[in-house]
Amino acid sequence: MKASQAGIFALGTASHSYLEFDIQKGVEQRELVAAIAGLREPRTTMGGVNLVAGFRPELWRAVAPDQAPPEVAGYNQDVVGPDGYTMPATQHDAVLWLSGSAYDVVFEVSREAIAATQDIATVAVETSSWPYHHDRDLTGFIDGTENPTLVDAPGIALIGDGETGAGGSVLLLQKWVHDSATWESLPVQTQEAVIGRTKPDSVELDPKPSDSHVARNDQDVFGKIFRRNMPFGTVTVHGTMFVGFSSDQHRLAAMLESMAGLQNGTRDALTRYTRALTGSYYFIPSLDDLKAWTPAAAE
């Protein structure tokens, strides 16, 4: 099987940076791919920084049709629920996700990446994130309880050998901002009903409310995904970076539709205390396919 980009599965990193790029006018798409692929050279992997690179699915298909899954598409339309609740589409052309043991090295590598691509692409969105109380998000609940183990994760996140785009993955990247004041005013029992789990130890409620976050994202229904969510923001404005990987985009899309209430009219209760600011899908090529675009491969 083709090698995947290892940073997808690099757990335990303390600092993260997400850079989303738009290609500049007059630049060919293949120039952007080559520039992003070239960032994997040793000069930008110092200090143990993991780098994951991806592209708008339509852009990757245009330059590498033989390595692009045929049905994967960008986040090109808002997801709008029956009551008008909206998860906006803010699709960009490329993404770099950098993670490492400390923010200073992530900061330096991010600066190098931006400098190396300044004539090719413009940074459209930059977000930094960090862990909170080991494995909790800023609601105070444990995040990723149902995440697969690292043994099982590649089989869930990566496209299988022999399929188009083998070794690659589909990434859903969203920035969710929390209404912390309202959320924290709720009794813990009410918070647990919204999430569908107990707060101290993340035990699933039985029965779980039908509009709970767990019920609206039941992976036994939609299929498993591999999540690398992280908190982001400042004391005054903060929330969650949703970072979800899957070999099948339909799993991710179905979860968003369920959260918005498009499947049966029941909206995810958590969306009353958090809202999506951004939404993009990126195809994360295998390391082998990405390496084909590096300067060394072209020589």
Image (cartoon, helix red, strand yellow):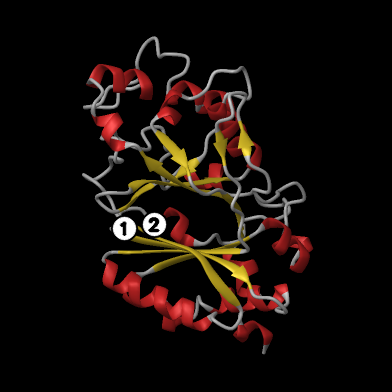
- Above or below, comparing residue 105 to residue 215 in the picture: below
State the separation of the CA atoms marked 1 and 2.
7 Å
Q: Secondary structure at mark 1?
A: loop
- Above or below, comparing residue 90 to residue 176 in the picture: below
- At label 1, the amino acid type is Thr
Q: Secondary structure at mark 2?
A: loop
Q: Circle 2 sits on which residue?
A: 10
**For the residue carrying disc 1, how many other residues have a C-alpha within 10 Å: few (<14), some (14-19), or many (20+)?**
some
Q: Quadrant of residue 42?
A: bottom left
Q: Quadrant of residue 88?
A: top right
User: How many numbered discs sit on the rendered protein?
Assistant: 2
Mark 1 and mark 2 residues within 8 Å of each other at the beta carbon? yes
Whole-percent x, y for residue 40 in the image:
50, 75
Answer yes or no: is residue 223 visible: no
Whole-percent x, y for residue 204 in the image:
35, 20
On residue 13, which mark appears? 1
Whole-percent x, y for residue 295 in the image:
61, 85
Q: Residue at left 68%, top 56%?
A: 57
- Above or below, comparing residue 86 to residue 228 in the picture: above
- At label 2, the amino acid type is Ala
Whole-percent x, y for residue 254 in the image:
62, 32
Which is nearer the eye, 158 or 16? 16
Q: Residue at left 34%, top 15%?
A: 205
**For the residue carrying disc 2, how many other residues have a C-alpha within 10 Å: few (<14), some (14-19), or many (20+)?**
some
Answer yes or no: is residue 186 visible: yes
Which is nearer the eye, 82 or 50? 82
Q: Residue at left 61%, top 79%?
A: 120
- Left or right: 177 in relation to 1: left
